[in-house]
Structure formats: structure tokens, C-alpha cells
Amino acid sequence: MAKVFEAADATNLMTELRRSFDAGVTRGYEWRVSQLKKLLVICDNHEPEIVSALHDDLGKPELESSVYEVALLRNSIKLALKQLKNWMAPDKAKTSLTTFPASAEIVSEPLGVVLVISAWNYPFLLSIDPVIGAISAGNAVVLKPSELAPSSSSLLAKLLEQYLDPSAVRVVEGAVTETTLLLEQKWDKIFYTGSSRIGRIIMMAAAKHLTPVVLELGGKSPVVIDSDTNLKITVKRIIAGKWGCNNGQACISPDYILTTKEYAPKVIDAMKQELEAFYGKNPMESKDMSRIVNSNHFDRLSKILEEKEVSDKIVYGGQKNRDNLKIAPTILLDVPLDSLIMSEEIFGPLLPILTLNNLEECFDVIRSRPKPLAAYLFTQNQKLKERFAMTVSAGGIVVNDIAVHLSLPTLPFGGVGESGMGSYHGKFSFDAFSHKKAVLYKSFIGDAAIRYPPYSRGKLRL
Ligand code: NAD
């Protein structure tokens, strides 16, 4: 039986990692590169085990695991290896007359010992991607994967222990008790991925030590469909971004659709047609869709689907089987705005469509709700695209596709308002785990008398 993680273990872990950090183990370019290369070896040599763990935890199809977890990680590591020297180099800053003669620069300093707490839905990507940032920036790091994906969590612990430097990179497996013990320590940054509810607990624990946080949370990400669109491609992309990404259990999954009353029947017909083309007449049998992670989440989804005024609104799907934790792609039309399905993040295969009189009313629905992690629009109308991008607030906006912004390391990935704070990916990950230290080098030349007492009007006239 695994040893119980106790308060003393958390303290000892922090002491050991702090010692390594203070000794400068993690600061050098070579150490950072060596650890990143080891992460690449993990991706290259252990993909079949990773795919298998994801299948155990989520029934995730092999292609989804290979592309959305392993390949994305590989890209992320390769980019860090390629860019690390540039990222680490100080940025020159302009000086002014008041500091003349001087030079100035911004130095990216590692923060120290950082904690990464990740979620179950993309357990490899969401664990290792922030760790890439933490290591690139020269920190010691503890990873706490989610207990809800136990095969992935234990594989992560095994592989990181096998390959990475244990004096500075560690994994603690566990649930609330273990995370709570970790949160009592004084970290130099906490990077959390998960629900907004637990995000608040993390932030409160961090506040005790004035520890900065990145909170990668969720929310209800809307999709607006304009009638001036390529409907076939629109629905294919929505289906791929909803049911083709962990069966809707993804943070930037389409949560609900907004369209006009007039256009909705066409959208529904096209969705039914493409869903059948993708997953067959009996989607419950399809091997190309993940299952629901566990019975608690299955019951949560059943409950929101079974609300009377919601179950009446199913226009496609609705089948479910608690024995194998499968729920079919389910579309609902015009559910009440105050129903559970419209009040909380769905995080599963249910997709309500809300109809309004025009697109401006659709935009207003989004603006009247907590700011989502992503907002999507499908249209060919250039003016509408710009209006959406400029007037709708969300962590990220994608026009004419779903979720693809996540794969672009030149874009920051993160939330706003209720969907989170801070961001990462590419250089943003390096920055998330660095302190931007202002450094000014002054010379002894040109020492102005005006700045020293005794002050006098006469000095001003000099
Ligand atoms: P989860 O249940 O796996 O929890 C996340 C982490 O918090 C886990 O490591 C868990 O052990 C820990 N935790 C749970 N309860 C805790 C407590 N009381 N105190 C301290 N730690 C605790 O994941 P979840 O929260 O169900 O994840 C789903 C949510 O995460 C959704 O809202 C989703 O949108 C969001 N999410 C966001 C992103 C993103 O990148 N922004 C990615 C994935 C998921």
C-alpha cells in the first residue's frame, strides 16, 4: 500500500526543493535543457503507455490521445528547447534623461519553488505543459495530478520520477487531503487548472502567503452561428470540438449554441446529419468518443438532463448507460435560461441551442453572463467578425472554428473574470513562471548636484 502523505512530508518536500533551488540547481541553461529533453524522451518512448492510461481513465480514443495530449506536448517541448536561450536573455530597456548615463534591462528571474495542480480531462497535457513552463523558467516544481484520472496520475508519477531530476522536480499523487497539505506550504507560484469553485479555495490558500496564482478555470463557452455561414463545415467543426474532444469534457468545449429562431432548424438538421456520419446510427456503440470520467460526473449530467423542462427539449440523442458511463451526443432546443443546464458548465456531451431574434441579442446573452474561457462565432460577414472580437469578452475568441487557438503557442491561453487569471503556452508559459526583474546599471559619471540637499531655487536654475 502506498505511504500516506502527511503534513511532515509536505514540509520535507518543500525543504528539499527549496534547498536545490537556493543552491542554484535549476537556474542554469544546461539543467533546464536536460530536463526538457527528458520530457521529450517520455513523449517519444512512452506514447503507448500514455494512450493506454488515457483509455483506462476516460475511454479516450487513441487518435485523440496521440494528437491532443502527446503531440501537443511534443510541440511545446520542442518550442521551449528552440527558444529557451532567447527567452532567458535579458530584454534591453530604454533609459531617459533622468537616469543618464545608464543602461537598463528586464531580467527573467526564476520564482523559486512552484506548485502545479492539474485536472483530469487532459491529464498529461494539463500536467506537463505547465511543468515545461516552470522548468524553462528555472524553477523547482511539484506536480499534483488529478486523482480522478488515476492511471494517468500514477503513470505521470512513475515517468517523472524515472526521468527527471528528483532534487527539483517531484510528483505528489492524491486528492483533497494531499492538495490541502501542499497548499499550506509557502510556494512561489501556484498554477491551478480546474473548476472555478476549487479555484477560489486555491486562491484563498495562496493569499495566506501572498503567493501569486495562475488559475486556468472553465465556464460556459458559447458558439454563435450566423445564417451567412458555410453550414456544413460549421457543424463539422462544432461536432469535432464538442464530442471529438473528450466527449465535451474539455474546458473550451462548446457549451451552448446561440442562433436565430429562423436559422435554428437548418442548424439542427445539419448537426443530426453530420453526427450520424461521424458516429453512426448508434453513437452509444462508437469507439470514437470518450466515456464520462466517473459515476459522479455521469450522475451530475443525468440530473441536469432529467430536469422536467429540460428533458422535454431534447431534439437529438438523450440515450445513456450508467454501466459503461456512456452518454450519447444530445442536442436540446430552447431550454429555460434558469435551468441547471444553462446555469453551470456542462462539461459533457449535452449541447443546448438557444434561439433569439437576431445576432445582437445573441451577443447580449454572452455579455450578460460570466466571462467564458472561449467564445466562438461562425460567419462569413467581416463586420460581424470584428464586432464579435471587439465587443465580446472571453479568455479567447475563435472565428469559424473551435478550440484551435489552443494549439498556437504565439497566443496566450487563459481566462478572464470567472474563467480564470493569468495565461500560458509558448513564451507566455515561461513568463508565467518568471519574475520580470527591473535592473538598472548606473555610472558614476554625470552626478547632478540638484538631487542632493541643501535644496535651493538656485540649483533649479542651473
Ligand atoms: P478536478 O476534480 O480534477 O480538480 C482539479 C484539481 O483540484 C485536482 O488536482 C484536485 O485534486 C484538486 N482539488 C479538488 N478539490 C480540491 C480541494 N477541495 N482543495 C484543493 N484541491 C482540490 O477537476 P475539475 O475541477 O472537475 O476540472 C474540471 C474543471 O476544470 C472545469 O471547470 C473545466 O472547465 C476546468 N478546466 C480548465 C482548463 C483550462 O485550461 N482553463 C482545462 C481543463 C479543465
Image (cartoon, grey):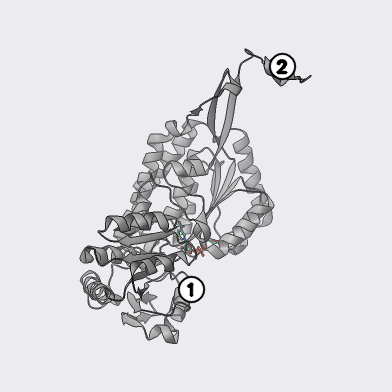
**Image quadrant occupied by the C terminus:** top right
Q: What amino acid does circle 1 point to?
A: Ser
Residue 307, image quadrant:
bottom left
Residue at 60% x, 37% y: name it: 20
Q: Is 244 left, or right, of 371 in this rendering?
A: left
Residue at 61% x, 42% y: name it: 17
Answer whether residue 7 is visible to the viewer in this image. yes
Judging by the rendered image, the residue that carries numbered circle 1 is 343
In the rendered image of this protein, does residue 46 appear above or below residue 255?
A: above
Q: What amino acid does circle 2 point to?
A: Lys
The one nearer the camera, 183 or 163, is: 183
The answer to whether the beta carbon of the residue marked 2 is less than 8 Å from any atom of ligand 1 is: no
1 and 2 marks in contact (CB < 8 Å): no
The one nearer the camera, 415 or 39, is: 415
Q: Is 202 left, or right, of 404 in this rendering?
A: right
Residue 424 in the image, given as x and y percentages of width and height = 46, 48
Residue 36 in the image, given as x and y percentages of width and height = 43, 40
Judging by the rendered image, the residue that carries numbered circle 2 is 459
Residue 386, image quadrant:
bottom left
